[in-house]
Amino acid sequence: MKRVGENHNIPAVAIREAAFPSPFISGLEYSAPARGGWTIVHVGMLVPEAHEIFVCAAGCLRGVVLSAAEMNLTDRFSTVSIEEHNVLEGDMEELLIEGVTDILNRLPKIPKAVLVFSSCIHHFMGCDLELCYKTLGERFTDVDFVDCYMIPTMRKSGLTPDQIMRRQMYALLKPRGKSEKHCAIIGNCFSMDESSDIVRLIEGAGWTLHQITECRTYEEYQTMSQCSLCITTQSVAKVGGEALAERLGMKHLYLPSGFDADEIRTNLSVLAENLGTAYNTNAVPEKEAEEAMADAKKVIGNTPIAIDYTVTPRPLGLARLLISNGFNVTDLFVDSFSGEEKDDYLWLQENAGDLKVLPTVDASMRRYPRERQEKVLALGQKAAYFTESPYFVNLVEGGGLYGFDGICRLAKMMKEAFAEPKDTERLIQMKGLGCESCI
Amino acid sequence: MRQARTVISTYSADTFGVCSALYELGGMVVMHDASGCNSTYTTHDEPRWYNSDSLVFISGLTEMDAIMGNDDKLKDDVISAVEELKPKFVAIAGTPIPMMNGCDLEAVAMEIEAEAGLPCFGFQTNGMQSYLVGASEALCEFARRLTDKDAKKRQRAVNVLGATPLDFSINGSVESIKKLLKDSGWEIIGTWAMGSSLDDLARAGEAAVNLVISSVGLKTAIYLNQTFGTPYVVGTPNDKCFSEMVLRDLELAENDGKSRISFSNLEASAETRIYIVGEGVTSRSLAAAIGIKSGIVPKVVHTLEGLPELSGVLSKMDNQAMEEEEIQKAASDAQIVIADPLYRPILPGNCRFIALPHEAFSGRMFRKDIPDFTKIDVEKMLGQYEI
C-alpha cells in the first residue's frame, strides 16, 4: 500500500500496485454517511407478514429499531434488551424465551412467522439457541419461527451476517409438491427488471417466476416451495440458494449478474438449457447494449467517473466494461476485492493500471478532500459522497439489472445522472434504497 | 416482562452518549466494537456527522481478537490513527463484547496515553445503558482531568452543562439558551459540550454558577460544585415564564452560593392527568412552565436511568420508568400526554397527544419538528386542549 494525494495521508493505491484481495491495511474504521444499502432489518421485512424480534443490548437495538421505525414498520418489529445482569447471571435462554413469549402474547395479533435475531453475546456465552427455538415452537404451534443473526463480531469467521440473512429469509419455506415450470430467483432485495434478459428468458420459456420481493402474503411466499429450480445472481446469496435447493429438492443455478459479455452469454445458455429451451442470441439485446454504451459515451465524454462497491457486487467488472467502452474511470472506492473478480482485477492492472483504488472505511477517509474542481459522474452513493457529486447513479446491489438489458439500462441511468443533478446529501442518507422511508 | 418492548423505540446508548458529548472538542472517539455501532450512531444519533469532520471511529473488533484478548490491535490502531490525524485527545468507549470479556479500557487508555503522549480516556460503557450514563460520565471525566484547578472565579460568569444534540438537536436551542443568558448579562465560559472548545471547558472553574439544562449535566455540576465550590441551577429555559425563573435562580445562586432546582416548588398533584414522558430535567422544566401558566403541573415520567445525581429532580408524583409496560402503566390514566411520537402506540388511545420529539429516542425521524426550547409557548402548545 502506498499513500498518494497532495498534503493528505489518503491510502489510495493505483490498481497496478494494489494487493489482491485486500489492498488496504485494516485499522480503525470510518462510516461514511451513505446509507442506501439494505440492513438485515430491511432484508427480513421481505418475508411478508413476518414479525422481527431482536434480542440484543440497547446499543445494538438502537440502529435496528429505528430502521424499522423509519420504514413505518414498528408494528412488525419488537425488541428484547440484554442487560448486564443477564450476562452476569447467564440467563440468556430464559431471557430470549420469556421475552419473545411476552411480546407475542402482547401483540394485537399473533404473527404467522417470527424472525428471532440473536446477537454476538449469545454466541460468546454459548447460549443454547436450539433449546430456545424449540421451546418457542412448542409454545406457539401456529407460529413459524426462524433463527436469524445479528453477529457482526463474527463477520470474518465463516459466513457473513449478510450471507446468513439471505439464507434464513427462505428457511421458513415448507416442503410442498413441485409444480411444472416454476422457478425462483432468490436472495435479492430488488425484483429483476421485467425487461431483463433473465426474466424474458424464463417467461419466454413458459415458466412462472417467483421472487420474494413480489410476494404480498405469507401464503404467496410459501408458494416458492413449489419451484423445481432456484437461481441466485449475487455471491452473497449463493449459500442461501444451495441450502434451499438441498432442503427442498430444487436445482440451484448460480448465474451471477455481471458485465462481461461472455459470462452473460454463458449464464443465459445454462439457464436456457435448464429451462428446456434454446438460447436465442437474437432474443437478447447484445447489440443494443453496445450501442447504449456508445451513446452514453457520446454524452458523458471524458468526464471522470467514480465507482463504489455498493452500486453493484461487481465494481471491477463495471469499471472494466466502462473502460473498454472508452469511459474515463478514475476512482474506485472499494475496501477489498471479491474473489469472483480476479479476472477483472488482472485486466484492469494490465489495461488501466493508473486507476486509483480508495478505501471507504479507512479512518483517514474522514478527512478525505471531497470537493472536486471538475464534474464527476459517480456510480453509487459512496462514490457520490466522496466526490461530493450531485451527478450520480442512485443504485445499490445492482438493483434489478441483469445481462445485456441491464447494461442498456445502466447506460441510460448514467446519461440521466450526468444530465440531472440530485440532492446527494438528502438521498444518500436514507436507509434501504427503495424501501418506504419517513426521512 | 421487563426488557421486552413490543413496539416502542429504545434510547441512544451509553457508548453513543460518550461520542455525542465529546464530538466538538477536537479529539478522537473510538467505539471498541465490531461494526454497526458506528453507522448506528452516525446515522441516527449524530446530526453533525455529514457536514463536519470530527473523528469518531470503530475499532472493528473481530471474534478472534475478542477471544484472544488482543487489546494490542486496538492500541496499535489507535496510535496509528493518532499519528495521522493529530487529535487533541483520545476517548475509547466500550460495547457489549469488551464488557463481557472484561477488557480493561482504562488500562488500554493509560498505555496509549503513555505511548502517544496525549490525554486518553477509557470509558467502561457497555451499550446496555442509555446515553445519559455515557454522556454524563464523559463530561464529568473531562471536568476531573482537564479543568484548570487554579481557575479564579469571575462575577456573572456561567457554564452551561448538559448540551448534546441527543437532548437538544441542532435546531438552535442551545444557541438560544446562550443568547438568553448573554442578554441577561451573563458571560458564558463554556457550554458542555456544544459550541465550545476544549480550552473553554478547561476554564470551567471561572464560572460563578453553573446552569444544568439536562440530566446529562448533573454529574459534572456536582463535581464542579465539590471541586470549585460553584453552585448550580437545574432547569431548561423554555417558555418565557420559566426562563425568568431560571435567570432569577442563577442570580440567587451566585449571591448565596446555594444550588437550586428551579422547578422544585412546582409539583404535580395526585389528580393531575397530564403527563410529560421523557428526559427528567427538560420534562420537569416544561411541566413547571405549564404549571405557572395554567396552574396545573403535569406529572413527569422520566424514562431514563434514575441516577443518584437526579435526586431532587423528580417530585413525589413523578415516576421513573424505563420499560414499556412500566411507562404504559405510569401514564395509563392520561388525558393529555406530551411525548416523543414513538411513544404514541403505548399511550391510552383516547388521550390527547402532543408530540415533542426527542432525538435520543426517535433519532432523526422527527428532527424538523423538534422545537427550539426557548421558543416554546405553553399556551400555544396546550391551546387546543382544555386542562
Image (tube, grey):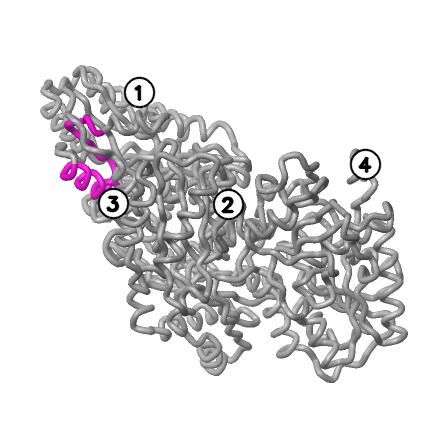
Based on the picture, tell me whether residue B196 belongs to the magenta stretch.
Answer: no
| Residue A271 visible to an observer of this rendering | yes
Residue B386's tag is 4
Based on the picture, tell me whether residue A244 belongs to the magenta stretch.
Answer: yes
Q: Which of label 1 and label 3 is nearer to you?
A: 1
Q: CA distance from mark 4 to mark 2?
A: 34 Å
- Looking at marks 2 and 3 on the same chain, the residue that comes earlier in the sequence is marked by 2
Residue of label 3: A348
| A302 sits to left or right of B322 | left
Q: CA distance from mark 2 to mark 3?
A: 41 Å
Q: Which residues are magenta?
A: A225-247
Residue of label 1: A194
Callout 2 environment at 10 Å: few (<14), some (14 to 19), or many (20+)? many
| B164 sits to left or right of A399 | right
* Prevailing secondary structure of the magenta residues: helix
Q: CA distance from mark 2 to mark 1?
A: 32 Å
Give, as a three-letter code, the residue at label 1: Glu
Give, as a three-letter code, the residue at label 3: Leu
Are the numbered discs 4 and 2 placed on the same chain, yes or no?
no
**In contact (CB < 8 Å): disc 2 and disc 1:** no
- Looking at marks 2 and 1 on the same chain, the residue that comes earlier in the sequence is marked by 2
Are the numbered discs 2 and 1 placed on the same chain, yes or no?
yes
